[in-house]
Image: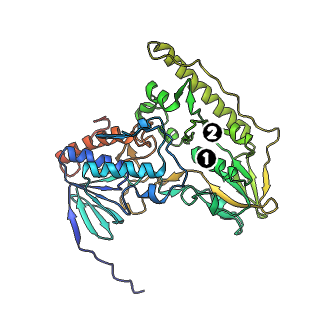
Amino acid sequence: MIRAPRRRYPPAGAVDVVVIGAGHAGLAMSRCLAELSIDHVVLERGEIANSWRRERWDSLRLLTPNWQSRLPGYAYRGPDPDGYMSVSDVVEFIDGYARLIGASVKPHTTVTSVVAEACGYRVATDRGDWRCRAVVLASGAHGVPAVPAAAAALPKSVTTLTPKTYRNPDQLDGGGVLVVGASASGIQLADEIRRSGRRVILAVGEHIRMPRVYRGLDIQWWLDAVGILDERYDEVDDIVRARRVPSPQLVGTSERATLDLNALTERGIELVGRLVGIDEDGKAQFSGSLRNHCAMADLKLARLLDRLDDWAAQHGDRPAFAPPERFAATRVGDAPRLCVDLARERISTVIFATGFRPDYAWLHVPVFDHKGRLRHDGGVVDAPGLYVLGLNFMRRRKSSFIHGAEDDARDLCAHLAASLRLGSGGRMPRGAVG
């Protein structure tokens, strides 16, 4: 077989650090590197905040209030600190940050491979190769939708979407919709589509129930004040399990409304158990675990509220809190259905809101475990001079939020700077920083 000659590009340059991704995490790292006068470049496949521009549904708003949006040397200064940013607001926020810090961003530069070399790494792109001593992977945790294998058995007549490809109800036909997954994305999409007049079935697995407001304050205020968002990765018993916990059932609206399964049921959405497969006749099969999953979510919510109340009791000198609240248990029908005939019930669209995984297909360094997950210790990847940012519970419980990048970037930048001083991205002991 005659192989086509490998396309060669001229060398793009040499720097100490290449940051891959110009979202909020990559820019936060850029700011921290600049503070230490470390030569670096930020490579971005599209525009700054590209995934927010191209891969979000129209009505999406942040789960965190505006007052919580901050990055190193930058914070929300708008007129609505208790509101929630829309997609365009987030793009403007990140764009403004890039301008403020004068980040050295190379837009429309797609990374095609990263390989280790004797003195660091070679980062190949469609605009030339970069050589560097260290690499920061800041391309985000939402690279590829984690669609279950059952999707492959869906009839061809059924349209399949994910939160990356869904935009608004207008792109759907008039048929019913099965939403798989009841975390933040799943419940928001189910609610929006139901409000458009379509029939909606929601397949519910493990989920985290959470009120938008508790005792008169946003739940994020409580999580911040109590210190839950600052819990570190090396302080939990099972960090692998903790990193897989789904995002809480929250939505950002001007009414600061709680959107849980009870609210969805009241709006006419049918709840079924976790999707376990599609049979040869095109019938969707669901587990009988719905009641157990709901009971577990209710139990965890009660534990969380107990913890918040205990904290409030110990901080009585704070502004008066509203009285403690408890919420009705999740209502589950007597016999949730275990099977839905998609064709007979005119379910024409299935949306898999079942999470994401990072996309490191271009990373040719032996740093993956047997399940293909990146091996790292709080963002310090298992290879000298290689770092990652923006993953769920990476260093702290807040790592995946915009404001979580501030502390993580400072920690990892300190580690990176020390390793550069050691020479060639030398290995540092665990817990050396942060």
Question: Camera-side residue: 310 or 319?
Answer: 319
The answer to whether residue 174 is visible is yes
Question: Camera-side residue: 107 or 88?
Answer: 88
Distance of label 1 from label 2 (alpha carbons): 8 Å
Assess whether mark 2 and mark 1 are in contact (beta carbons under 8 angstroms).
Answer: yes
Instruction: Left or right? Give the position of 357 relative to 301.
Output: left
Q: Quadrant of residue 161?
A: bottom right
Looking at marks 1 and 2 on the same chain, the residue that comes earlier in the sequence is marked by 1
Residue at the spot 32% in from the left edge and 67% down from the top edge: 125
Q: Quadrant of residue 151?
A: bottom right
**Secondary structure of residue under mark 1:** helix
**Secondary structure of residue under mark 2:** loop
Q: Identify residue for label 1.
A: 188
Q: Identify residue for label 2.
A: 259
Instruction: Left or right? Give the position of 35 relative to 212.
Output: left
Residue at the spot 73% in from the left edge and 43% down from the top edge: 267
The answer to whether residue 382 is visible is no
